[in-house]
Image (cartoon, grey):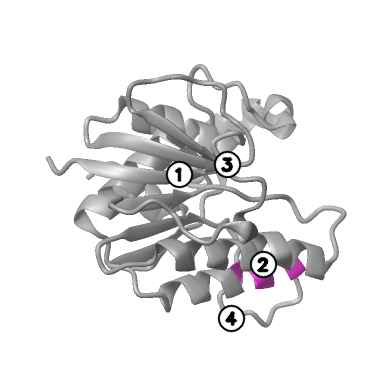
Amino acid sequence: MRVMRVLLTGATGMVGEGVLLACLEHPAVSEVLSVSRKSCGRTHPKLKELLAPSFLELTELPKGHDACFYCAGTTSVGKTEAEYTAITYDTVVHFAELCASPQMTFVHISGAGTDGTEKGKVMWARVKGRAENALTRLPFKAAYNFRPGFMKPMPGQRSVNRYYWLVGWLYPLARALGYASTLREVTQAMVNAATNGYEKPVLEIRDINALAAR
């Protein structure tokens, strides 16, 4: 089994925290460097932290990592397109440019419904699509855009979105219809993409669940 050192963003959010917990358990991950505005509040022999008030102010990142799992993000609710673009496109691409190298695999958590044409009427979907396309043009070993849907949290998570407590009971149905994954599956698919690759740069929900099972 290939062992990896991983960069992770978003560890204080629901998706990033779930990915962090799963990475800390995963035998293929030897180290996780969490880059975040604030500490995730956890300690573990594998875990290191780099606190950065703004990713856009970063001018360099530590070298020697095999993969970056970019899980930071925000909702578009209440934001203008310019505000959402600053977080979802400008910040993501700036961070990716800092760690881009032929030795690194970049795995970006995007979202189901993202518009890869960048021309649709839904603002958030266009912006995410623009970010996805920009990442695939950077000089990485490989770049993958994950488009998960409904995700079931990892056991022991502290950061769980309010919506999950309201609609979590629908998970079995969403799963049966192919619209859901567990965060453990998402992480396993991310690790598998980083270690063995995948045939497509964009992974929809069914791709994610299938890759997790490999």
Screen quadrant of the N terminus: top left
Q: Are marks 4 and 2 in contact (CB under 8 Å)?
A: no
**96 or 54, which lies in front?**
54
Q: CA distance from mark 1 to mark 3?
A: 8 Å
Residue sitting at 60 percent across and 75 percent down? 130
Residue 8 is marked as 1
| Lower sequence index among marks 4 and 2 | 4
Residue 125 is marked as 2
Give the secondary structure at mark 1. strand
Where 52 sits versus 118, above or below?
Answer: above
Where 165 sits versus 84, above or below?
Answer: above
Give the secondary structure at mark 2. helix
Residue 36 is marked as 3
| Lower sequence index among marks 1 and 3 | 1
Foreground tag (1 vs 2): 1
Give the amino acid at mark 3.
Ser
Q: CA distance from mark 4 to mark 2?
A: 9 Å
Residue range highlighted in magenta: 123-129
| Lower sequence index among marks 1 and 4 | 1
- Dividing the picture into quadrants, the one containing residue 21 is top left
